[in-house]
Image (cartoon, rainbow, N blue to C red):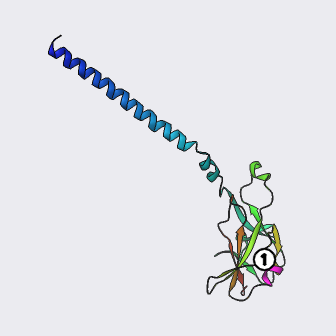
């Protein structure tokens, strides 16, 4: 064998080793990406905050009320029911039970929140809620399940809370 043939043989084997190494690295990266994508923890996290809610007063969304142009507002003399409504109207969501919530009262001067009650509600009478508020306070609705999104959760009360 000549020296040139030996060099060519070595080059050929080095190239094959490099090709196999690169293929193994690519396979490893691809395998790792699939593992990350199929991670069961990611599946659990992705179900959080997927159902959008809105605050409802009687049979209408509070945000659709004519006096709620700059935010959610409710008058001191309102006697209807406050509840939460699922925004998306689909068969998938029709099987979900009525969303539950808790209530906090916010002192607008200090930003302090206090829990209205330990109870969990599906609805509450507006006058019962308002009677526990003072001027300079507002109502905060807190969802009780991570699957819910409530973008507008603060209700300003006209003429104080």
Considering depth in this image, is 43 or 71 the residue closer to the camera?
43
Residue 91 drawn at (x, y percent)? 77, 48
Observer-nearest of 151 and 38 = 38
Residue 46 magenta = no
Above or below, comparing residue 127 to residue 3 in the picture: below
Question: In the drawing, does residue 43 fall left or right of residue 120?
Answer: left
Give the residues drawn in magenta, as a range.
Answer: 128-133
Question: In the image, residue 20 lies at what x, y percent?
Answer: 37, 27
Residue of label 1: 117
Q: Which quarter of the image is occupied by the N terminus? A: top left
What residue is rendered at 36% in x and 30% in y? 21
Neighbourhood count class around disc 1 (C-alpha, 10 Å): few under 14, some 14–19, many 20 upward: few
Residue 23, horizontal then vertical, whole percent = 40, 30
Which of the two residues, 59 or 8, is positioned nearer the viewer here? Answer: 8
Q: Secondary structure at mark 1?
A: loop
Query: Does the image show residue 9?
Result: yes
């Amino acid at each position: 064998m000549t020296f040139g043939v030996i060099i060519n043989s070595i080059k050929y084997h080095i190239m094959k080793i490099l090709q196999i190494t690169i293929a193994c690295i690519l396979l490893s990266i691809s395998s790792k990406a699939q593992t990350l994508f199929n991670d069961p923890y990611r599946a659990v996290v992705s179900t959080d905050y997927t159902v959008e809610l809105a605050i409802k007063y009687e049979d209408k969304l509070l945000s659709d009320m004519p006096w709620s142009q700059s935010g959610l507002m409710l008058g001191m003399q309102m006697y209807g029911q406050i509840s939460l409504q699922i925004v998306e109207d689909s068969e998938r969501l029709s099987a979900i039970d009525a969303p539950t919530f808790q209530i906090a009262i916010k002192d607008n001067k200090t930003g302090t929140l206090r829990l209205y009650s330990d109870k969990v509600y599906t609805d509450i009478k507006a006058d019962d809620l308002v009677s526990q508020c003072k001027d300079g306070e507002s109502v905060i609705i807190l969802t009780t399940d991570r699957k819910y999104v409530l973008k507008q959760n603060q209700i300003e009360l006209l003429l104080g809370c």
